[in-house]
Amino acid sequence: MFIDIDNLDRSFFDRLFNKNKSPKQINLARIQKTIQKKKYSELGFIIYETFKGYRIAVTGDTFNPRDKQSKRMLRDFRSDYLYRFLCYRQNCYRARLTPKPYRIGQRRLKMIFPNRTEEEQLEHDNWVKEYKEKSYNFMTCKKVEQYGRFNRNRILDYHDEICGIRYNNQLA
């Protein structure tokens, strides 16, 4: 399971008692507190920082995006409403592996599919090449902490490789 947390809102309590903490610091503390709950003690967690918030990889069980336990867990971690909706609707968990083009200064490209002319295909191919060159200097997320009984697997290895975890690049 992947959990996406981008809603970095500050409650009245946070504004009153955590004036010196950023919204990201407050959310990280919330995530850590939720992980420590007894009901999650048998699971493994990796917390990743993203450009706008956090992503959590969860192992130790299988998670059906449409069952009550998974929906409750996404709410417990204050995952974004849109992310929860998409997980349920598409019956899968999602994690962006490559940077959003606008965050790395990549120009927009009008997508034409499936019937591109040769000129449109060449423009698309050049855009992809330029995007790959620019995105090489960025990472989509970086590992923050690991908790519990965490099991590495091919999915997480692939995730970390494509996201650029081993490089200390700028988040995008």
Image (tube, rainbow, N blue to C red):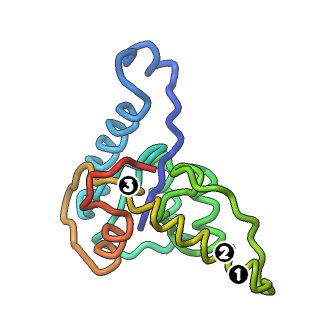
Provide the residue designation for mark 1. Answer: 121
Question: Real-space Cα distance between discs 3 and 1?
Answer: 31 Å
**Is 145 placed left or right of 93 in the picture?**
left
Q: How many marks?
A: 3
Q: Name the one closer to the observer, 10 or 54.
A: 54
Circle nearer the N terminus (3, 1): 1
State which mark lies toward you, 2 or 3: 2
Q: Amino acid at mark 3?
A: Cys
> In the image, what residue occupies the spot 67% across and 79% down?
122
Q: Residue 135, which numbered label?
A: none
Q: Amino acid at mark 2?
A: His
Disc 3, SS: strand
> In the image, what residue occupies the spot 53% across and 32% down?
9
**Is 101 placed left or right of 150 in the picture?**
right
Residue 56 can be seen in this image: yes
Q: Position of residue 51 (x, y in %)?
A: 45, 46
In the image, residue 43 above or below residue 120: above
Q: Position of residue 155 (x, y in %)?
A: 35, 77
Question: Real-space Cα distance between discs 1 and 2?
Answer: 5 Å
Provide the residue designation for mark 3. Answer: 141
Q: Position of residue 74 (x, y in %)?
A: 48, 55
Disc 1, SS: helix
Q: Quadrant of residue 43?
A: bottom left
Provide the residue designation for mark 2. Answer: 124
Residue count near mark 2 (Cα–Cα under 10 Å), binned few <14, some 14–19, many ≥20:
some
Q: Position of residue 97 (x, y in %)?
A: 45, 66
Circle nearer the N terminus (2, 3): 2
Q: Name the one closer to the observer, 35 or 55.
A: 55
In the image, residue 120 above or below residue 87: below
Question: Real-space Cα distance between discs 2 and 3?
Answer: 26 Å
Disc 2, SS: helix
